[in-house]
Image (cartoon, helix red, strand yellow):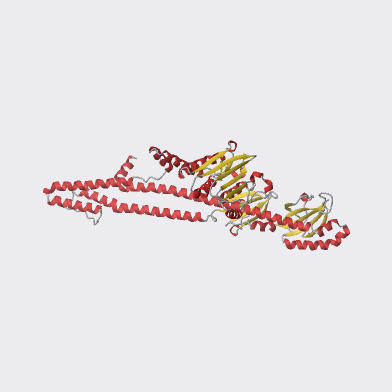
Amino acid sequence: MNRLIQAVKQSIIVQMALIILIIMCTLTWMIVQSFTAFQGLERDNANVLANTILTQAENSLNSYYIALEDTAKSFGYSPTVLEYYQDDSLSKVEDINELRTVFSNLLLLNSHMQTVLLYDNQMQLLAGLGGDYSLPERQQRLRSIGELSVDYYEGEDQGLCYAYYLPIYDLSSDEYMDQLGMCVFFMDREALDATLSNSLSALSCAVQLQTRSGDVLSIQTTEDLSNVSEISTLTENDLFGSTHGSWRQNGWRITTAVSIEANAGNEFEYRKLVMIGICIVILMFLLLFLFTYVRLARPIHKIQDFIEHVMERPAARLQMKRVDDIGTVAKSLNRLLDDNQRHIHEIRKSKIMLYEVELSRQRMKVLAYRNQINPHFLYNTFACISGMALMNDQEEISELTMALSDIFRYAVKGGNIATVRNEVENLEKYAKIIEYRFMGKIKLLIEADEDVMDCPIIKLILQPIVENAVFHGLEPKMGDGLVQTTITRVNDRIRIVVEDDGLGIAKEQLMEMKRNYESIAYTAPEQARVPEYMKPTEMVEGIGLGNIVQRLKLFYETDYSFIIDSEEMQGTTIVITVPDHIREEVIQ
């Protein structure tokens, strides 16, 4: 260890190599952190796409179910079918041709429908139209409500079919729910394959539908994944982002998977640019090292070697054709030696020249030592600024800096879920910054019930709304302003109200914002399902806060309310209500 320290002190090359090594280690650390960050962004992007495909698949299945239900009802409750149920045995034989005509028209509406079976209320088969299908014993029961199910049915190919069960009631009977029988509609598996295929909206992705027991009903992939027969091979792969959910109609499981690399987008380009930039920096450091060795270290070693042997060869002179400082030193040394030989009487002058040469060398050493100082990177910047402010009795600057530091730390630390207490504390720090920035003209007031402080809520849901009120409602006002945030509990829900007395929003602009929110598939809760305090006073649901509305929809689906009431020159009020809990599967 002592030898290494001595070598560092005595050799410029070792010193430069040490500096380069430290810089290279720092760059390596930066590369690792950059690529980790990019990989995180790419995975998050893939997970968002997987959730989008899941939502699209659920919507497509719901649309398919509604269309299937309507088609089934149009057949089952047609006058011909109802009359057939009420005919006697002889009339049924005569009316079978009319029944086949209605069935033919049904096939024109839905080409995937293969067979229709008509049963009476004792599960006796009355008629069968289309292919050769029959119900297995486990399905031979009368349904009182519509149901979509799946099973293996006896037929020509013994294939997997989907069946929709439609109960048939006598609409002319005075008796309530007088059931005549049941229609069973059989569809081939392409019926759901085409529905799921329409939801593939990303590159290199797949969606799978399976029963509660785990049987795969359908798996649809993009062309590059056509050889995948089980989506678990993708969901268990770290190169894919995935998610799953269930279809509410019958609990069938929906699983989606999206390739991270294929959908990386700009992150992949940014990663390439970072890599190219780092390679250029490394090349520049190597050139710097080579330049230092060729232009500084090697000439100095040559001068040192010449000086060590000059007494053995008094007539020798240093041959260096350079016009920089090192060339000047070499010429001065040669001149010194010439003067020493020719002019003994100028010994004093020669000593002075030697002193000047030595002084120049010392200055070069000082410069070399100065170049040894390792670059200091800006760590804990906010803490340094705060400490310096306190040392200079600038408590306001220190307080403002630490508030900003806490806000940044809160923004990047932890997951997507926080408590109301965390949100209130973060908003209080933001209030300090606003108070300093606007010199007390704009004030932020926060009131929260104690019994909601520990309830979970989406992280960073309050500060963007308050910031929007400050900079779009109060700052253009050019005067005093107030933003009041109130958080209360109403039954089992959290109610958040953000009010400002700013410039407000024109009604036409609010309606335009509503149309923008509709474009991101935002749908307000049904008016009959929400209490009075959740109902909007006007048809407005957007104020440039689309990100918040989208996050509310992702975390709470339809169990939330987002309402805006605004009037020009009077101010704006935003009311958000959410449950006082978040489902465990959403948190995970």
Could you say where residue 460 lies in the image, as x and y percent from the top left? Answer: 54, 45
Residue occupying image coordinates x 60% and y 59%: 223
Query: Could you tell me which quadrant the N terminus lies in?
Result: top left
Q: Is residue 100 visible?
A: yes
Could you say where residue 454 lies in the image, as x and y percent from the top left? Answer: 58, 37
Specify the farthest residue to the top: 450
Please state which of residues 564 and 415 is positioned toward the viewer in this rendering.
564
Looking at the picture, does residue 79 appear above or below residue 395?
Answer: below
83 vs 49, left or right, is right
Could you say where residue 424 lies in the image, as x and y percent from the top left? Answer: 54, 40
Please state which of residues 556 and 87 is positioned toward the viewer in this rendering.
556
Please state which of residues 543 and 458 is positioned toward the viewer in this rendering.
543
Could you say where residue 398 lies in the image, as x and y percent from the top left? Answer: 43, 40
116 vs 410, left or right, is right
Residue occupying image coordinates x 67% and y 48%: 527
Residue occupying image coordinates x 70% and y 54%: 65
